[in-house]
Amino acid sequence: MKLVSYQHLDQPGWGLVTDAGLVPLHSASYPTLLSALQAGQLDAIAAQARAPALPLAGIRFLPVIPAPGKIFCVGHNYEEHRIETARDETRHPLLFLRVAESQTAHLQPIRRPAESTELDYEGEIAVVIGKAGRRIRAEDAWAHVAGYSAYNDGSIRDWQRHSMQFTAGKNFSGTGAFGPWLVTRGEIADGCELTLQTRLNGQVMQHSSTAAMIFPIPVLMAYISTFTTLQPGDVIVTGTPGGVGAKRHPAVWMKPGDLVEVEVSQVGVLANTIAAECV
């Protein structure tokens, strides 16, 4: 299934994407995709879908999970990116957190803040948790996955360099694009190699696959769930490959009017224009 969060006629909702359009699935009991995940009712709700489809062109996309409880981002999880950033090898994943307010959606602008011109792209694969777990074993991890999406971990590089911590540069409003939809686990075989490509104004800037991850998805889930409980709707943004704009010569920064696309095989294309933040 492809599941999307959206607004239609100024009302939020969520639904099933089909060849005919969008079938709304929200209700008073399950007003959001997150609420359906938390209740463990996703498949049951989708199986009862009978409402007429809306055209996708008539909706405004929202982030797949607009308000996840936790957004974990993984730094330097591809060897090529680790090398280009001159980071030391590590036996453990490098993690930082995003806040929900920093997110934006498919076909919505990524906003360059007034405080910086160093807005960089980071195409990534997002994993959405479907079943709660603490101290999940790597061999059991797939059973806790609800599905997959694309993510652009838009980064304000000069603010990221203010300290050894990434928080400031990773949480400007409207910089983390998440979408277009959630492709549920049943559509993608567990452990299947997914390819990832980032394009800026049509030019390929990043290209890799999950086979190049230093810490694969089950290892990330096992590590994170050791210190906190992964809850339904939590998001793990699994890292970006080499080729980021900051490490090119000269550096390539996204600017207003640009189009950035992140494509994940078997998932789809997350597309965003760049706009200056209104202040």
Image: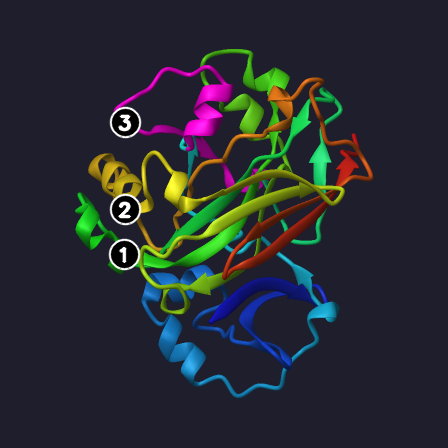
In this rendering, would 266 be left or right of 257?
left
Does residue 76 appear in this view?
Answer: no
Dot 1 amino acid type: Trp
Please tell me in which quadrant of the rendered image residue 140 appears: bottom left
Q: What residue is disc 2 on?
A: 218
Q: Nearer the viewer, residue 52 or 127?
A: 127
Q: Residues within 10 Å of mark 1 (few under 14, many from 20)?
A: many
Dot 3 amino acid type: His
Q: Earlier in the sequence, mark 1 or mark 3?
A: 3
Q: What residue is disc 3 on?
A: 92
**Residue 172 in the image: x percent, y percent?**
61, 30
**Residue 203 in the image: x percent, y percent?**
71, 41
Q: Name the element at disc 3.
A: loop
In this rendering, would 177 be left or right of 75?
right
Q: Is residue 249 above or below residue 197?
A: above
Q: What residue is disc 1 on?
A: 142
Asked whether residue 92 is drawn in magenta, I would say yes
Q: Nearer the viewer, residue 135 or 191?
A: 191
Query: Do the residues under discs 2 and 3 have CB atoms within 8 angstroms?
Result: no
Tell me the residue at 31%/51% (across/down): 231
Dot 2 amino acid type: Pro
